[in-house]
Image (spheres, rainbow, N blue to C red):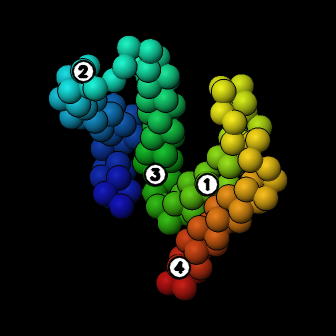
Amino acid sequence: MLVQKWAPAWGAGRFLPVMMGFVGLYSLPLLALGGPLVPVGAWRPLLLGSLLVAVQGSLLISSLALFARATTINVVYSARGLWSVGLVWVVGPWFGNRERDQGSAVFRARLAGAALLLAAIVIVIASR
């Protein structure tokens, strides 16, 4: 909600770089602590995952800044649970993920859980 409040006043072109700059600045102490905590071979996947989360965050914040519809964007963003189950199922084996080997019953249970979470969000928003 704060993004929806402040981004229109600043403009999306100014708000997003400032916000991402502060996120990066606040992350520096964690990076210093991560050196001894992260195994050498884990840095590349960690950085790739961080990049993907940054892209996702940029898209979310940009959408909020441009359209100022936090409720609608929250419902769309919550749908990520559904497509993430599908992506793990389809693309996961490319990265060595073996969740697919657990069978279709596990896949259906995870898909049902993601659908329930999305339905709960839609119900809460619709009841307002």
Distance from the alpha carbon under mark 2 to that under mark 4: 43 Å
Distance CA(mark 3)–CA(mark 4): 20 Å
Q: Is residue 8 visible?
A: yes
Q: Are there few (<14), some (14-19), or many (20+) residues within 10 Å of tag 1?
A: some
Q: Is residue 86 above or below residue 115?
A: above
Give the distance between the C-alpha atoms of the residues marked 1 and 2, in whole angstroms: 32 Å
Q: How many numbered discs, if any?
A: 4
Badge 1 amino acid: Gly
The residue pinned by badge 2 equals 36
Image quadrant in which you'd find residue 33 = top left
The disc, 2 or 4, on the residue closer to the chain's N-terminal end is 2
- Between disc 3 and disc 4, whose residue precedes? 3
Residue that carries the numbered disc 4 in the rendered image: 124
Label 1: which residue?
Answer: 81
Q: Residues within 10 Å of mark 2 (few under 14, many from 20)?
A: few
Determine which of the numbered discs, if any, sits on residue 33 in the image: none
Residue 86, position as x, y percentages in the image: 73, 46
List the residue tagged with mark 3: 64
- Of pointers 4 and 1, the one earlier in the residue sequence: 1
Q: Residue at coordinates 47% horizontally, 61% vertically from top-left?
A: 70
Q: Are marks 2 and 3 in contact (CB under 8 Å)?
A: no
Frontmost residue, 42 versus 2: 42
Closer to the observer: label 4 or label 1? 1
Q: Position of residue 124 (x, y in %)?
A: 53, 79
